[in-house]
Amino acid sequence: MKNILSPLSIPRIEMRALEAAAIAPIIQAVAERIGKAEALALLQEINEKAAFRHGLQLGQQLGQVGVAELVSEVASWCEGNDMQIEVLEQSETTYHFNVTRCPYFEKYREMGLLEYGQALSCCRDEAFGRGFSADLKLVRTQTIMEGADYCDFRYRFSSVSDE
């Protein structure tokens, strides 16, 4: 599946590193003017919107979205990097997994940008899911970026009748 976020076929991790390197000086300057918390909130808002659009475009491109399509997309997140996941549950309505090694954490730490990691990457996951399908929900209580041993992804497809 073509990565529509990376039209030049650059691995996603390298695309995120390029984005981070370009945006970090801007966010630092904005933080000096409006405060760090507001600057990070702005960065997160921008990345959430981009992730939502990506999910929406991908869902429309696929036409039909379910667990199989989500599994395929998550597999693309691992391409070109050392992300390691442990699948805990996969059914017709759920895809639960833990990320046990996060190359985004490693890359941002190496770049000295760890404080921006949540707003650069982690915030994208829930927004992507909302765009991918209105019926897809993500519950995540911890991330490696925030100091946990693993990121817990609990995706669930539901319909209005389930709620």
Image: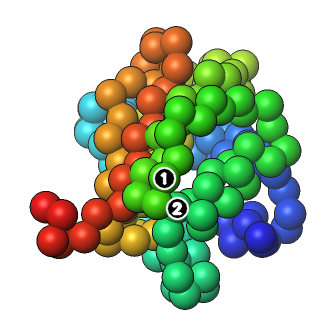
Q: Residue furthest front?
A: 91
Decide which of 56, 41 is in the foreground and name it.
56
Seen at 71% across and 30% down, the residue is 84
Name the spot of residue 83 as percent of width and height, x first: 72, 33
Locate residue 62 relative to residue 84 in the image: left or right: left
Classed neighbour count for the residue bearing mark 2: other residues with Cα under 10 Å, few (<14), some (14–19), many (≥20): some
Decide which of 1, 14 is in the foreground and name it.
1
Q: Are marks 2 and 1 in contact (CB under 8 Å)?
A: yes
Asked whether residue 16 appears in the rendered view, the answer is yes
Classed neighbour count for the residue bearing mark 1: other residues with Cα under 10 Å, few (<14), some (14–19), many (≥20): few
Q: Which residue is mark 1?
A: 91
SS assignment at label 1 = loop
Up/down of 138 relative to 157, above or below: above
Choose mark 2 or mark 1, whichever is in front. Answer: 1
Name the spot of residue 57 as percent of width and height, x first: 54, 79
Work out how far the residue at label 2 is from the one at label 1, CA to CA, in angstroms: 7 Å
Q: From the image, which quarter does the N terminus lie in? A: bottom right
Seen at 51% across and 74% down, the residue is 65
Locate residue 40 relative to residue 6 in the image: left or right: left
Up/down of 10 relative to 144, above or below: below
Decide which of 40, 97 is in the foreground and name it.
97
Name the spot of residue 27 as percent of width and height, x first: 46, 40
Which label was assigned to residue 67? 2
